[in-house]
Amino acid sequence: MASNIQEKAKKALGEFTKRQLMELDTCSHCALCTDMCPAYNESKNVLHAPGVRTSKLVKLYDKKHGFWTKLFGEKEITEKEIEELAESTYHCSLCGRCMESCPFGFQTHELWIKAREIVDSLEASPENVIRLAGLMDENMNPYGLEPDTRLDWSFFTDLDDAPELDEAEIAYFVGCTTAYKGANHDVAFAICSLLENQGENWTLLGEDEWCCGAPSVMSGKTEEAKKYAEHNVELFESKKIKRVITGCAGCYRMLKFEYPVMLGRKPNFEVMHAVQYLHEQLTTGRLEVEQGKEKIIYHDPCELGRLGGIIKEPREVLAKITSELIEFDEHGVDSKCCGGGGLLQSVNNDMRLNIVKEKLDEAVEKGAEMLVSACPACKLAFVDGVREFKHDIEIYDIHELIAKRLGVSD
Amino acid sequence: MNGTTAALYTFFVETLPYITILVFLVGMFLRVTRWSSAPKDHQNPKMDLVDSIKYVILDVMLFRKTFRRDKLTWLLVFAFHGSIGGILFGHMRGFHLWSASIFDPFGHWMTEFMIHTLPIYVGYTLIITTFLLLVRRFRLEDKQLSSLSNDYIALILLLIAAIVGQGMRLFPPESVPTEIYNVVFIPRLIVLHLEVVPSYHWFHWHVLMTQLFVMYTPFSKYIHILTGVITPAIYGSRRKELGI
């Protein structure tokens, strides 16, 4: 294999951090995480098991940086090993559920991102992931649509005058999956309507809004994600924004947790998921809704719940609108992924749909009339699942549901 | 003690411990160098002592996550690690870190049970659970896990050490000395005080295997004995930071 790939592999493997390396060395390959992994459970392919991924990574690391390389030199990483690592790394929804079964509590989400960086450096990323990186470069969003169409969603709603102010207290960061995917246009409209209803001084960013950078991170191009962080933060700060609100779980994690790390400083604004805003408004009495009796089941988006720590707020919000809130058997930090994350759709959409089917089956079995989540990628996965498997259940984003109940959106 | 036994005794008890300690220290140095030469973490949470300790106890010592999902596997891993803990604790009496008199308030029967009867059952538990973990690994290999060679070596080494250790209890001892018999591994530092002199055959094997275990620790999965408290402590602090 080309020596430059070997050199690149050595460099990328050498970028495991102290903690990550300790985690890889500590992993006992006990397979206690395997049954928790939605991708493995779907495929039963050993390469998709999280513990197998750590075995592969340790083997590769030791080939380039192990104890014996000092004495006997490095070993060559084979093409088969690279292919297996790519297969393993991208058949993962980055849901972090393996972390919740690991007795050692490895921060697997970060480990798998690092693994994708290694795959990227080995030029072994799946074709669709490479294509996505190109689209990001061209249009600042992963869907390949022109930046000036970013606000087109508002044409399909009743939002007549989407505000784009020079300065405002609150900025609504719409996010690409909400702005460009038809199934989510109502979510954007609902959040805008709620902000308007509450009399907030708020603004959209319009075509100046760039992707949050999460697709770049998930493609193993963390360095490139920095430019999105820099642009968006500069934009917020130039508008003297005090609070950034987003309805997307992935954007929320990027803005709140990843941007400060990428930029090496804490931005001058607070980041809030829209469900936290709703919770704040409802608990302080600034917003009131009538309680109904619909049987609603709530799905915790992985990036919001397990990886973002927002678990009780959506439940308390939903408890205000229904007396019949039910739960999946595994919820909160243990919530099963819907398959909508980690770029799984672009790598293996059948796997994504089969993962979402399991969730839909359980929801229907429990007699839920509505399945509610708080993430556009989850909503998209559920909508695709219902379309594919014909489940008899309504899919809503929590903001849509509240706005509808308040009569501020259709 | 005949000439060969005496020579083996000298090697296993008086020479090998120095090599063991040297290999262990060099291994730990290499391991720590491997970690310390890696780039710094920028995403580590601010450490919270209370939550760190809480998660180490719940997740590592009690295997809470495994208990919640699979009771049978929990029983296996808890009995395995519990028996190792029990055996290590028992050995500490031989090194005079505690005395049998701590059980005196519970009566003679309890003291006898704790220092002579229970250890035999704990030994069997370790042998059985180590064997079952090996079987589990074989069964899941290439289906749910992909072991490294040291995953097997570590378990096999432990299994042999446990079997020969149990052999010392079950086979007739060499003698019962009139006073405590001292096995001096390293003078004034590591001295084992024995009430009976076990069969030298089993004793030499046990001493060899346990020292191999110590030597192998820095280079193998045994390292989780040391690092297994660090990663869950970070996990605990991360959860605290997220407010979960």
Image: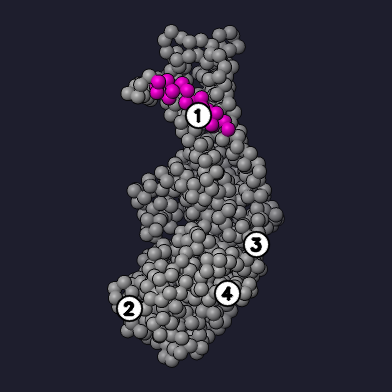
Query: Residue A39 at x, y = what percent?
Result: 60, 60
Percent x, y for residue A278? 37, 74
**Disc 4: which residue:** A392
**Which picture quadrant has residue A117?**
bottom right
Q: Where does residue A228 sit, x and y in percent of width and height?
A: 48, 72
- Please name which of the two marks, 4 or 3, marks the residue nearer to the observer: 4
Q: Are marks 3 and 2 on the same chain?
A: yes
Separation (CA) of disc 1 from disc 4: 55 Å
Q: Quadrant of the N terminus of chain A?
A: bottom right
Give left or right: position of A3 versus A263: right
Q: Mark 3 points at which residue?
A: A124
Closer mark to the observer between disc 1 and disc 4: 4
- Circle 3: residue type: Ala
Residue A4 shows up from this direction: no
Name which residue type carries label 4. Answer: Asp
Q: In the picture, residue A143 is in which quadrant? A: bottom right
Same chain for marks 2 and 4?
yes
Is residue A300 placed above or below B161 in the rendered structure?
Answer: below
Residue for point 67% across, 58% down: A83
Disc 4 on helix, strand or loop? loop
Label 1, secondary structure: give it.
Answer: helix
